[in-house]
Amino acid sequence: MTDRRQFLKLLGTAAASGALGGLTPAAAAASASAPATRFASRRPAPGQRRFRSDVVEREIARVKARIGDPKLAWMFENCYPNTLDTTVELGTLEGKPDTFVITGDIEAMWLRDSSAQVNPYVALARHDPALRQLFRGLIRRQAHCIRLDPYANAFLPDPHARPLSWAREDDTAMAPGVGERKWEIDSLCWPIRIAHAYWKATGDVEPFDKGWRAAMQRVLTTFREQQRLHGRGPYHFQRPSPRPTETLALDGYGNPTRPNGMIHSMFRPSDDACIYPLFVPANLFAVLSLRQLAAMSQAIHHDAAFAAGCTKLADEVERATHRDGRLRDDKGGDCWAYEIDGYGNQLFMDDANIPSLLSLPYLGCCAADDPLYRRTRARAWSEHNPYFFKGTAAEGIGGPHEGLRTIWPMSITVRALTSRDAAEIRQCLRWLRDTDADSGFMHEAFDQDDPTHFTRAWFAWANSLFGELMVKLADRQPDVLRSL
């Protein structure tokens, strides 16, 4: 059976050596060889781009003009449109507009990644009918996926296709069209987040039809099932793998818990198995998502009963997470745990993938100056976190997905996104600028001492997140970009 990590590392190695060439949009985006002319565009040729928006092109020019460092300006121009240039497929599904968004080097759509990848463009959709059509298609496709299986994390373009190669031996209830079936709370939160953002940005209610409402009912039902107040629920998962992070204990139901009102998550947003299934960052994300869903249901559909059900669950999860999800740090203050089991056992760490402890203000779960968050943030960006790494190239957070000594650029980007300190942001920008291996793109992870050793040359989420950071800095702290 093909191992996903091995496949991605081989792909990254091929891209770094120039083996993928420049014949297709995918290969052009993935190639990490240095450009023949310094700072020449690494985007696919205009005729090979999968989606074209004059509004996006104007935004690239606007922000790029505010960036004083020529390499950062070049990286922004490559990264910001990468999702639109290389990962978007427009079509129709069930007679309606459809948008399928792959992750980059995997020809499948993760509910999380696809939402995060297009998030930087949502504010522009008001001014671009083509972007609105793209968002309508994605919201519908995500709703279709949730109706197909709310426990799945990844889906295939063809609703009748077989699973991804590494998922074909999984012991779980796989349906056609499902790429992988790892239950992660955030897989159902991200589609709500992007739908809410689109609605607030445009006022457009066209995609929130009966199919979308049925999908949201599945979200609420699934969250309720995974509170596990009345049994373990229907989901189980086991995978034959030498990696313990790829499978679940106890017949596929995960390590034991004492249900407390929080939602159980079997996997993290890294697609790695939770140690303790009460995963704190995702529960805080779910609280926010349920309240956003309640607001949309009330305003768009005037469905007071469903909105009340969402709010009731949000209140339950919030109370339980605040009661049980904190620990005492070494200075006697409170900070968030990463995972707990309801018996009093708590795990502190952080992982670069979002939701993370570091990302809570970025998602909107708390304010960046919240004292509880500030203590948690300081602890996560330190040796108290076993997945915090400091090398000669940079410092940042990784995770078990790619192992020790590997820093994810995403963590550095999130640190900058959750800071207003100019010196801290400049340092993050320098690390991001100097660890791209002269590719002009973000990678999944790189060695703490040698950024030429990296994984995933074509990872659109990381590119989008970097682009989002640069846009926000251009608007909120332009002096930081001008002065670097």
Image: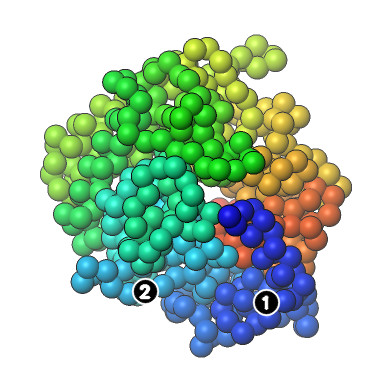
461 vs 232, left or right, is: right
Given residues 41 and 103, the one toward you in this image is 103
375 vs 141, left or right, is: right
Q: Is any part of residue 93 visible from this angle?
A: yes
Disc assigned to residue 5: none
Specify the amino acid type for callout 2: Leu
Specify the amino acid type for callout 1: Leu
- Where residue 258 sits, quadrant-wise, is top left
- Against 313, residue 426 (above or below) is below
- Where residue 177 sits, quadrant-wise, is bottom left
How many marks on residues?
2
Q: Is any part of residue 132 visible from this angle?
A: no
Disc 2 element: strand
State the residue position of label 1: 20
- Against 397, residue 348 (above or below) is above
Q: Are marks 1 and 2 in contact (CB under 8 Å)?
A: no
Q: Position of residue 117 (x, y in %)?
A: 49, 59
For the point 29% across and 30% down, which residue is it? 224
Disc assigned to residue 90: 2
The chosen color scheme is rainbow
- Against 31, residue 314 (above or below) is above
Q: Position of residue 311 (x, y in %)?
A: 26, 31
For the point 83% across and 44% down, which residue is it? 391
